[in-house]
Amino acid sequence: MPSSPFHLAVISPPDEHPRELALLPALFDAGLTRYHIRKPTWTRARLAAHLAAIPQKHHPRLILHTHHDLAAAYAIGGFHDRQSGAGVSPASDWHKHFFPTAALLRSRPIHTLAELHTALTTYPPTHDTLLVSPIFPSISKPDHAPSPTHLPLPELSAHLHARPFRKPHSANHTPQILALGGITPDRLATTAALGFDGAAILGALWQSPDPLATWRTFQSKIPKLPPPPPPPPPPAPHHHARQTPSGKPPRANPRSLRRWSKTHPTPHQTTQLRARPLARPRP
């Protein structure tokens, strides 16, 4: 089960969108924390111009899917390791070469249950976020539907709930698992019930006539996680005399000390009691 608040990320439209740059500041101001810039066919120069048009204060919230080296010039928050396509460099090699000590977020796609298991049982983990798709029929790609062979939902849900890979020593480093594909506000509860830590939104937002209002609808539908269990009640006080490991009387008020000394005579007191002669009866 997810143990942290349900997280929402947004993925950019794959090509030019007339309102994207104008809407981004409002989306960030409305609570968006992670924005994946996925422009698979764009050249490096075109993507650089796009990044320059986004206010610099929002750059740490951006995740690049292509042309990862641009993160150095624009202080980008992270990158996505794509499997194929133009402008792709191996994310792990790029990170070690350009930013060997930088705390950049790293994400990768997951399309099969086997890939998910491998990614989650690798320690230390190589990525911070896993985008598992498609979970529902895609909105932006009508021909992209869930595969009962590659991602059977019953087995996927059982795997996410069991979390056999979450070890006590590495619980804080477990990758965040986000659902992708066909995510709508009404499907957030189902997504959380499947065991996901959050969801990534694409088609439902950018195909909406009012993306900002749609984003607020998503926020209003974020599942409320159950509260943590109450702490156990304190132990009942003990009324019998308290013993100390050293055999010495506990630090207490004089009345308690006198009561303790009556039940714990010192060796000197014991010797005196044994050596005391018996009193003779009076004539």
Image: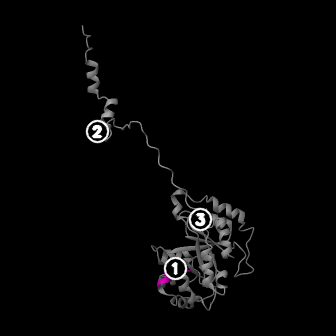
- The furthest residue to the front: 283
- Can you say whether 232 is above or below 264 in the image? below
Q: Earlier in the sequence, mark 1 or mark 3?
A: 1
- Looking at the image, residue 107 sits to the left or right of residue 259; the answer is right
Type of the residue with mark 1? Arg
The reply to whether discs 1 and 3 touch (Cβ–Cβ < 8 Å) is no
Q: Residues within 10 Å of mark 1 (few under 14, many from 20)?
A: some
Please tell me the numbered disc located at residue 225: 3
On residue 61, the disc is 1
Tell me which amino acid carries mark 3.
Leu
Name which quarter of the figure residue 111 lies in.
bottom right
Residue beneath the point at 28% across and 21% down: 273
Few, some or many residues within 10 Å of mark 3 (<14, 14–19, 20+): few
- Which one is in front in this view, the residue at disc 1 or the one at disc 3? 3
First along the sequence among labels 2 and 1: 1
Label 2 and label 1: CA atoms lie apart by 65 Å
Q: Nearer the viewer, residue 164 or 41?
A: 164
Q: Which residue is mark 2?
A: 254
Q: Does the magenta-highlighted stretch encompass residue 263?
A: no
Q: Which corner quadrant of the image does residue 106 belong to?
A: bottom right
